[in-house]
Amino acid sequence: MLQNRFIKQLFSSFLDLAPILAVVLIFQVLVIGQSVPNVASLITGTFFVILGLTLFIQGLELSLFPLGESMAYAFARKGSLFWLLAFSFCLGFGAAVAEPALIAVAEKAANIASKGNVIEQTNAARDNYALGLRISVALSVGFAILIGVLRIIRGWPVYYPVFCAYACIAIMTPFAPAEIVGIAYDSGGIATSTITVPLVTALGVGLATAIKGRNPMTDGFGLVVFASLTPMIFVMAYGMVI
Amino acid sequence: MIEWLVNFALKLLETCKDFLPIITVIISFQLLVIRRPLTNPKKTLAGFIYVLLGIVFFLEGLDMALFPLGKLMAAQLTTPEFLGLNPLDQSISWQAYFWVYIFAASIGFATALAEPALLAVAIKAEQISGGTIRAWGLRIAVAIGVSFGLALGTFRIVTGTELYFFIIAGYIIVIIQTLFAPKLIIGLAYDSGGVTTTMVTVPLVTALGLGLAEAIPGRNPLLDGFGLIAFASLFPVITVLCYAQIAQWLSNRNLSSKL
């Protein structure tokens, strides 16, 4: 049973990678036609990515997703506003800290920043910078989920917080250091990935189902977009502070 | 071999640290606030171990395959030999890099169309709209948005234009569209941008952007290398809102022609 599901998941992880591999292969053969160095390492790495994704998603489905989803529903149904908001913030924060794509890209960004002499060229400085980026993103995702939950409870239209975030970003960018803007803009999309999206969607849909007069189909959405905008603001702020 | 094992163990330990906050949140809220014991502690523990091992393998694989692959593509598509230009010529016009834009667009289109999370969202959209919006139409709208976004993003890296202008212009378009779009679909359209930036696409696209900024003369990875993900998550919002608008308009016209 488990074996079977594992193989199924392995196959679907491969399917996730397949479009990328196909496009790269087509370009290599038809357009570029040069030799590719380190083919063995590329293939091993691809295998690791597939295996890693499989274990990761299988593990999430066994542990975090059922727990997180049932809790999201439980908090949405009863419980005080305070605990609901506290849970929303912590869920967003924890999910963003664990997001593997964010771990990888923050490390990359730290390397680039240290090559460009924005930070010192030591391992400690790089680690600090990467951690700072991830904490900023995590705080902002927590904050976004908190506001988003408040929005669903109060029944504000989806675009109010989104337009506010747009205005904030437009005003802040000219004042932020130029070298932080790129990574700040990207961090939003990176933060809303494999762990965050399903948990946050469960929370939104659970809330909209539980509250009278809300439609889970329409009010349940809109949490993810806000969680992908606030990291831009928080990371730019981080760049201004350091 | 031993060195590799030690390295692996160290990475595993580091990942534990990354995963600790979410585990603490879930478990402490479960025990202290909801006050119910875990229904299946063994299964949960096994799940956490899977997740940790998964992240370690995934990150290792990224460093070995997806990051180098993105960088390699960026490097190969911009070599003077490939472009058929004189290597000493520093003033290469942006049109010369057209294969870069095509590559970025193809990656965006293919990954978005194959994204399983998007399929789920698309089916939901069809239900919300009562069939006005087709699941397939929405998926194609998102795929066009991502591919156009990535192509424009690579164009920005090649020309070194400010990221700010493109993104703010995109925001203004979204604001105008929101005012006219069917109300029911707005939340879903907004979220469609976040759905396409997955664990697999993010590293490849990041590496592609950084690689381009390194390879193209006059560009600096620090200032120009990032930003592709921002494009890939903004433009689907625009195309989905646009598609929702067209779908509503078509269905209204059909209704009025029947009357």
Image (cartoon, grey):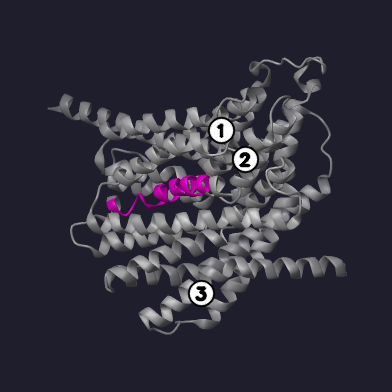
Along the line of sight, the residue nearer the viewer: B36 or A228: A228
Mark yes or no: residue A35 visible: yes
Q: CA distance from mark 2 to mark 1?
A: 9 Å
> Quadrant of the rendered structure where residue A178 is?
top right
Please tell me if label 2 and label 3 are on a single chain: yes
Measured as percent of width and height from the top left, residue A162 is found at: 35, 43
Q: Which one is closest to the eye, mark 1 or mark 3?
A: 3
The circle on residue B205 is 2
Q: Nearer the N terminus, badge 1 or badge 3?
A: 3
Q: Chain of mark 1?
A: B
Along the line of sight, the residue nearer the viewer: A4 or A129: A129
> Quadrant of the rendered structure where residue A181 is?
top right
Q: CA distance from mark 2 to mark 3?
A: 32 Å
Location of the C terminus of chain B (image quadrant):
top left
Q: Amino acid at mark 1?
A: Leu
Q: Which residues are magenta?
A: A219-237
Q: Chain of mark 2?
A: B
Measured as percent of width and height from the top left, residue A105 is found at: 63, 49
Q: CA distance from mark 1 to mark 3?
A: 37 Å
Seen at 46% across and 73% down, the residue is B26
Q: Amino acid at mark 3?
A: Thr
Q: Nearer the N terminus, badge 2 or badge 1?
A: 1
Q: Chain of mark 3?
A: B
Characterize the magenta stretch by its predominant secondary structure.
helix
Please tell me if label 1 and label 3 are on a single chain: yes
User: Which residue is tagged 3?
Assistant: B24
Q: Amino acid at mark 2?
A: Val
Seen at 18% across and 30% down, the residue is B255
Seen at 68% across and 57% down, the residue is A127
